[in-house]
Amino acid sequence: MVPSGWSDDGTSLVAPNKVVVVKGFRNFILSQPWEADDWPLAVEYASASVEPWNPAIGPGSRQDFRKGSLA
């Protein structure tokens, strides 16, 4: 379900602050209840360690939100 105030065109989910969420993170948000005010702070980015405090997990993509992060 698209969070209230967000828009989705089938590929890109756009938060009220105009930051875009795509691919797996988009699917994750749409597949469960997501708080409408938990906006992304920036677009998805590649990281040498998806959890900087646990480098053993390794590289991947992250997107930070007001209330947490997706990796």
Image (tube, rainbow, N blue to C red):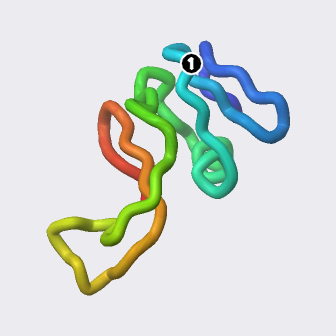
- Name, please, the residue furthest toward the left: 53
Tell me if mark 1 has few (under 14), some (14-19) or many (20+) residues whose alpha carbon lies within 10 angstroms of its own.
some
Q: So how many labels did they put on this image?
A: 1
Which residue is at the front of the view, 28 or 24?
Answer: 24
Residue 19 percent across, percent down from the top left: 54, 26
Element type at mark 1: loop
Q: Quadrant of the N terminus?
A: top right
Residue 38, given in percent of the width and then of the height, sits at 41, 29
Q: Which amino acid does label 1 sit on?
A: Lys
Residue pointed to by mark 1: 18
**Relative to 61, 30 lies left or right:** right
Residue 26 image point, x, y percent: 64, 45
Is the residue 49 above or below the residue 7 in the image? Answer: below
Pick the residue in front: 31 or 10: 10
Q: The C terminus appears in which quarter of the rendering?
A: bottom left
Q: Look at 44% across and 27% down and name the residue there.
A: 39
User: What percent of the width, then of the height, locates residue 21?
Assistant: 60, 39
